[in-house]
Image (cartoon, rainbow, N blue to C red):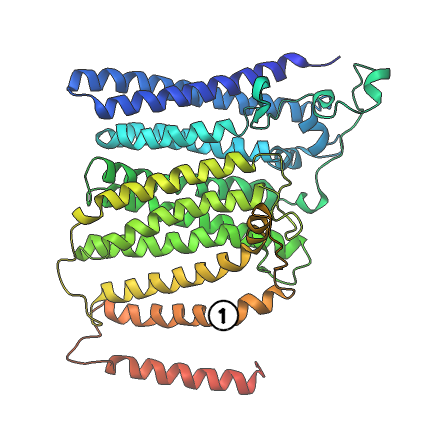
Amino acid sequence: MIHENIGTTGHLMVIASFVTAALATFSYFKATQASDELSENDWKKTARTLFIIHLFLVIGVASSLFVIIYNHYFEYHYAFTHSSLALPTMFMISCYWEGQEGSFLLWIFWQAILGVILMIKNPKWESPVMTVFALVQTFLTSMILGVIIPWIDLKIGSSPFLLLREAQPDLPVWSLQPNFIPKDGRGLNPLLQNYWMVIHPPTLFLGFALTLVPFAYLIAGLWKNKLTEWIKPALPWAAFSGAILGIGITMGAYWAYETLNFGGYWNWDPVENASFVPWLVLIGAIHTMIAYRNSSAALKTSIILVIATFILVLYSTFLNRSGVLGNASVHSFTDLGLSGQLLIYMFTFLLGAIILAAYRWKNLPKDEKEIGIYHKEFWIFVGASVLALSAFQLIFTTSIPVYNKIAEAFGMVSNMALPADQVAHYSKIQIWIFIAVAVLSGIGQYVWWGKLKQSTSFKPLYSSLLSSVLLTVIVINFEKVY
């Protein structure tokens, strides 16, 4: 018996979640434009109701997909492709986000939860911040919409609730057995049958979802001309995002160490780089935001880095899911025809943020005081710059397949290839950047605690510098570390 009801219900809830996210975006936008408090509260109340309904619909969609996987409804393409009867429950959870649609759904779920938390926690910023949040949710839910507009032959999203006969209509079996149901599925990729893959993707996608919070506060601040006030509510969320995203990346590195033949925790794989680069920029943004909070310095740098962090998350999503890295990475997704949607999603927020920042740029307050080398804010800025340099080198090389695609689109031939020895290529530059980070971290401690002053110059560093050089010489010679 084909269990069509659960799939139909799930698909209807996907459509409803898309509609409620779009309506919540409109309602929150109207609340920001309201001319009086009564009208604002009415629109805000409507928007809150819609967004909460959206959350429950997302939970319903997620539950429907898990029921299909857990009960082995192999008549569904998603269950057949990613699960099998032999898998224990733990790995059936991993099946959930092995596919693109399931991982998008995980991302949507986290952002819906975060949206409701922000709605309750900071009502003063609710309308502009939630306008951004609801708009992002609208774009994300469109990725799993699975709707075809026939008169223009346009497919929007890829549904996780397609029956096998709908996903693969040309198979000969349908003419013989219209209600054929496979007895077993293809199963989970053996490389993903690891306990780290049960907890790594949820942690990583929570980190991705959290990067939206400081970005939403920034956009709200620029939009409502609160050019400095956004830093205070955004900074704790940025720090939390940095911690969670860093933990998620570390979990992925340990999975690679245990499961793949990398020979270590990190191989500079393009998909690894795509998640690592936004984290580097985010850490730089956190530092400059702290510098502004302490001394009203580096506001413009903070704006640039916060925008860059969120856009790089979207760009890494494009790299991972467009199929452009299909031949370059061991764990990128294949193309589901979402490349165009992903590009529209990314460029909507990139251009919107740039235009808004450019419009407000001349009104941004200038640094209140000159920052010299004996100020801790100077070293924070230098550290952020080094992290940004590291991110640039990584993303520039990782994007080589994208350059080839762009050249093809313009009728040109491009034979650029990713480095044959990725470890050697990246490490010869990144190792010096990491040494710079270590040195700056050491100097930064002396500056932060007031040990390094103009009156003492760099004298407090001498004993530490001599000790470290001596220890290095000893280790190199006695442990034969070359």
Q: Can residue 220 be seen in the rendering of this structure?
A: yes
- Left or right: 148 in relation to 470: right
Q: Position of residue 111 (x, y in %)?
A: 42, 33
Work out whether 273 lies above or below 3: below
Q: Which picture quadrant has residue 230?
A: top left
- Left or right: 444 in relation to 457: right
The C terminus, quarter of image: bottom right
Residue at image position (43%, 27%) is 138
Q: Position of residue 97 (x, y in %)?
A: 59, 36
The N terminus, quarter of image: top right
- Left or right: 301 in relation to 455: right
Work out whether 369 lies above or below 54: below
Work out whether 58 lies above or below 224: above
Residue at image position (36%, 85%) is 466
Instruction: Please state which of residues 340 and 133 is positioned toward the viewer in this rendering.
Output: 340
SS label for mark 1: helix
Type of amino acid at the residue the image marks with label 1: Ile
Q: Which residue is mark 1?
A: 429
Residue that sits furthest to the front in the current view: 411
Residue that sits furthest to the right in the current view: 176
Residue at image position (86%, 16%) is 176
Q: Position of residue 246 (x, y in %)?
A: 45, 51
Q: Position of residue 182 (x, y in %)?
A: 79, 24
How many numbered marks does the figure carry?
1
Instruction: Please state which of residues 422 and 151 is positioned toward the viewer in this rendering.
Output: 151
Instruction: Please state which of residues 429 and 260 is positioned toward the viewer in this rendering.
Output: 429
Q: Which picture quadrant has residue 346?
A: top left
Q: Residues within 10 Å of mark 1 (few under 14, many from 20)?
A: few
Q: Can residue 10 be seen in the rendering of this structure?
A: no
